[in-house]
Structure formats: C-alpha cells, structure tokens
Image (cartoon, rainbow, N blue to C red):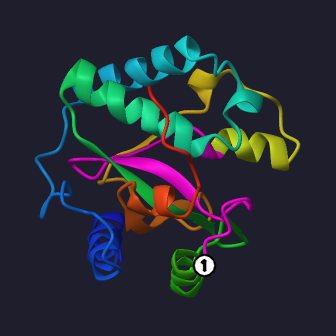
Amino acid sequence: MNYKSRFIDAVKYTKSLRLNAEDIPASFTEKLSRSTLQEILQLCSDALYHYGFNDSTDLASQCVRVHSLIKQHLKDDMGIDSYITIGDRYWDDYIYCEMGRAAIEQELTSPEVDQPIKAHVWLTLSDGTVIDCTAEAHADIIFGRDVHPSHQCIMLITPDQEEDAKVGYHRPYLVGEDFIIKTGMVRVFAM
C-alpha cells in the first residue's frame, strides 16, 4: 500500500468516526511542479523562523502548532490547499508516535485533555506530497543527534518517492483538525 492509498483510507476512517472531513478532496490533484515545491520549502523555512522556531529544540513536540501555522500560510500566501494529517512514522525497527484505531476510538470516547496523545501531525498537500517540519527535529532530540537549524528539519516527500521501511515513511490514520480539537491535543488559538 502506498501513501495515497493510506491517505484515502484515513479520510474514510475519519468520516466513519463522524469527524469533520468536509474540506478533504475525493481525489488528488495533478502533481505540483518542481518550482512550486521549491517555493513551498522556502515558505515553510521563512514561516518557521518568523514564528521563532529556529532549530530542532524549538520544533520538537510542536507538530500541531507548527503545521497549523504552515497550513494557513500555504493557503493565504500561495493559494495551496493542505490537510492536517494525523498518524505515525514507521521504520522497520521503530515507530514514532505509534497509533492504532483502538487508541483513537478510546481517546474520542474518553479524552484525557491533560495527557499527551501519542500521535504525530503533518500536512498532506493536494497532490499527495507530505510536508513534515517536526519529525526529524523530534528525532534529533530523542536520539541525541545534533541540533539542526529549522530549514534542515523540513521533510518534503513527493508522492512518487518509493517508501522504504529502513528510511521510514508516514502512516496516516485521520485527516482534518476535528480529532485534535475534540481530544484536546491543541487548544484553538488565533494565528
């Protein structure tokens, strides 16, 4: 199964839980151009530094806030749609923020708003490209790697890239902001 297939399954699952997924498209758009992807990378980098996310330590554990800000900038500054995507990142020997349907459903029925949820948030663009500005930053911290400047932490994974369990890949479970609001992962804040 590839990312696009898992994303479509995540949309279906989100809707089955009666979470708001109205703005999620039924299909993906044409592949974004290389120049557009370069502009997106620059926008992400500029936004991170503008909001004070200067390096790995600033970005770690900030996936909801960071990607909510980037989502808004992509729409306002470039007219590009992106979708908050909730899931985990999988390697053959480690799973970052491992999720599962049972945990999701438990959290929805009995949210523990004062406890952290084991979930990761990133953006999926309209063509299926993944933008993740925080996973590598968090890995820098938890694995004791060097601290990197924010622009080096940005992952941009196009839908035509092969998935490799050694390199790691994203596994979406839910799409949209409804889950993060209902479970208290984030308080609604002005941008």
Say which residue appears at 53% left-offset and 77% top-offset.
104
Classify 128 as above or below 141: below
Q: Secondary structure of the magenta portion, mostly?
A: loop
Front residue of this view, candidates 162 and 69? 69
Q: Secondary structure at mark 1?
A: loop
Q: Residue 97 at what x, y percent from top left? A: 66, 64
Q: Position of residue 80 (x, y in %)?
A: 21, 33
Using residue 63 as the reference point, say whether residue 143 is left or right of it. Answer: right
The picture quadrant where one finds residue 147 is top right
Quadrant location of the C terminus in the rendered image: top left
Note whether 66 is above or below 6 in the view shown.
above
Label 1: few (<14), some (14–19) or many (≥20) C-alpha neighbours in 10 Å: few
Q: Is residue 120 magenta?
A: yes
x then y, percent, for residue 103? 60, 81
Question: For the point 44% across and 30% down, which residue is it?
Answer: 69
Q: Point out the residue furthest to the right here.
A: 144
Q: Is residue 190 left or right of residue 141?
A: left
In the image, 86 versus 180, the foreground residue is: 180
x 53%, y 34%: residue: 66
Residue at position x 30%, y 76% from top?
A: 18
Residue 89 image point, x, y percent: 58, 62
User: What residue is shown with label 1?
Assistant: 110
The mark total stands at 1
**Displayed quadrant of residue 187:** top right
Answer yes or no: is residue 61 visible. yes
* Segment colored magenta: 110-135
Q: Residue furthest bottom?
A: 102
* Position of 182 relative to 23 (above/below): below
- Amino acid of disc 1: Ser
Asked if residue 37 lies left or right of residue 105, the reply is: left
